[in-house]
Image: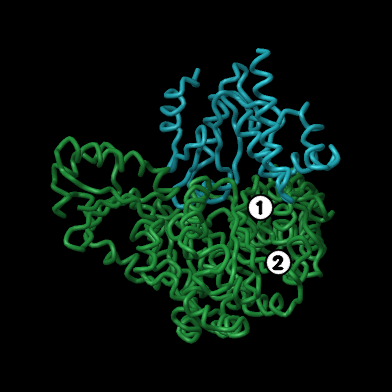
Chain colours: A cyan, B green
Amino acid sequence: MENGKVERKDELESILQNFARLANGLIPAFHAIQNSYGYIPKERLPEIARAFNLSQADVYGVLTFYHDFRLEPVGRHVVSVCRAEACQANGSAAVIDHLRRKLGVDFGKTTADGEVTLLPTYCFGNCACGPSVAVDGKLYGRMSAQRLERILRGMGASA
Amino acid sequence: MKVYVPRDFSACALGADEVARAIEREAKRRGIALDVVRNGSRGLYWLEPLVEVERNGERVAYGPVAEEGVEGLFDAEFLEGKEHPVRLGNPEEIPYLRRQKRLVFRRIGKNDPLSLDQYRKEGGFAGLARALTLSPQQIVEEVTKSGLRGRGGAGFPTGIKWKTTLQAVDDQKYIVCNADEGDSGTFSDRMVIEGDPFLLIEGMIIAGLAVGATEGYVYLRSEYPLARQIFEEALERARAGGYLGKDILGSGKSFVLNLFVGAGAYVCGEETSLLESLEGKRGMIRPRPPLPAIHGLWQKPTVVNNVITLASVPVILADGAEAYARLGVGRSKGTLPVQLSGNLRNPGLVEVPFGVTLEELLFEYGGGTASGRPLKAIQIGGPLGPYLPPSLFHVTLDYEELAKVRGIVGHGGIVAFDDTVNLGEMARYAMEFCAEESCGKCTPCRIGSTRGMELMDRILSGKKSPGSIELLVDLCDVMINASLCGLGGMTPFPVLSGLRHFPEDFGYAKEEVEPLLQKM
């Protein structure tokens, strides 16, 4: 545990070293931090602010403006569903209902066992092949409740 | 022997990667030597994954192909172009594709988009070569003469925008490509970046030469990870090929190009919000004036153009402004890559000259609804575009003609809905989307969208009070006229168009809403 902590600190520091030189490095830095940690650790915000010579309020403001960035860890799996019009026209409501019922959580929430986080997305650009669902970053088109069921079972997340 | 399997985000969402691997596996098992080439998508999305075999320089297409169907294709000797239930023949002869007039998309879907050799072989960099022989004024003049208008949605004449930046005097200017394609029902930017990235790079270099900008950024949305991967690779190759950096092709001119990935904010597709985000800040709208063309990125003169706008430029330079302007109608010149999606049998990318009717697009290309039910409405121009009923499908694709029926071209997306849709619910969704995505800078958008959502909830639940509909129209009026940008200013379009054309979905009779909508 102690070792893990030390290693992590180095990782964030090297990310800051890479991006703080750039005039517009804060957003790429957040992407990089979230890639390594899965989220932006709140307790490290003072350090991030110092590296960019910004106030903590500024850093927090940028962080919370963008839907991509989160201050909490997510579940072991992330399921993102498109909520936009083109997918609605192809029956995404049934897919969304199925997911909410099956997982027992609403958008932005993680199942009690920490397995799955359900996130909304407003368009993957897969509009000609909707409904669209991404599971752990892999996009699936022409989604139906049945197909989704198979995918969820495949990742061992279905009750 | 070559077999082509698209490496396109949508094709991959339908299993193209698995199909490509299965083909390689099966070929190996049978001792057949073949190259699997990952091309872009031709945009015939109901046929994806679309596999093409090349024999003696001729292509034979098969689609849609599933991973499980690959063995059967080998058994049917598809490598010899033989018969099979999903055999489509020469892909270029498929009517959907043959009837189009592809300029921007002329290369997309044919070959490996990351091959510089292939790009040059198919006419790539011809526009740049010509631009290098012209003065900045001459390039701007050429683009102005072509009649090209911004394809991101605003439809502003590109030549005039460029001229403004060219005339601005400063030590540094920028070209920014808006690749934050957030509109639902649009994917043409994604297809260009994934399917012909050098075309965008070429367009940006030419824009740089035209206005005297030596640095550029592509602001790409984070929802497009494959586009990111392909574009990063394309940038590397273009730099190695001497097309980017200092002294482009020995011309003495420089252009440095960078990729910047957004973080999931729809409003950053608005150019001033995009610039704020690109500077590393919250994507808050900037009031205009000053125009970005004069005070843009880091307050420097900046051209902000959409992907399709910039990707049209090499075509215009290579073929000449006259050839481009001959296509289209009225003040809508050239072609538009229309994106058909939603409930259609044949959704996909249709690049055609302006002037085609909506009917032709929806039925002759789109094939009518996928569900087989009646087509009730289309939403045109993205999530902030209006809903139009079939009685308006005779209208032509044309900035001015669409404006006459309160329609917009937007970024060229058309989403079709069958008769199961309720326009009242879609109007509520439009307000919810605006509330979710508002940057918060101006009150009409920030507060108006939330109040609009609550009001729609009351109207739809039947708990409406006598003045509910007047209030909704009044709120829309305020949002349209007092919002700082298109997000708040256009969210009322889907709401009011729904109310105008489908009042029954809101629980009202036509006579009740018509007088209210007259002033709108």
Q: Is residue B158 left or right of residue B126?
A: right
Q: Quadrant of residue B73?
A: top left
Tell me, yes or no, if residue B457 can be seen here.
no
B422 horizontally vs B76: left or right:
right
Above or below, comparing residue B221 to residue B389 in the picture: above
Asked whether the residues under marks 1 and 2 belong to the same chain, the reply is yes
Regarding mark 2 in the picture, which secondary structure is present there? helix
Residue at numbered disc 1: B427
Q: Nearer the N terminus, badge 1 or badge 2?
A: 1
The residue located at (63%, 62%) in the rendering is B216
Q: Position of residue B504 (x, y in %)?
A: 63, 55
Quick one: B491 or B200, which is closer to the camera? Answer: B200
Q: Which mark is residue B68?
A: none
In the figure, B1 relative to A36: above or below? below
Q: Amino acid at mark 1?
A: Ala
Disc 2: host chain: B
Q: Nearer the viewer, residue B61 or B303?
A: B303
* Mark 1 crowdedness (10 Å alpha carbons): few <14, some 14-19, many ≥20: many
Identify the residue shown where x is 74% and y is 47%.
B435
Type of amino acid at the residue the image marks with label 2: Glu
The numbered disc on residue B514 is 2
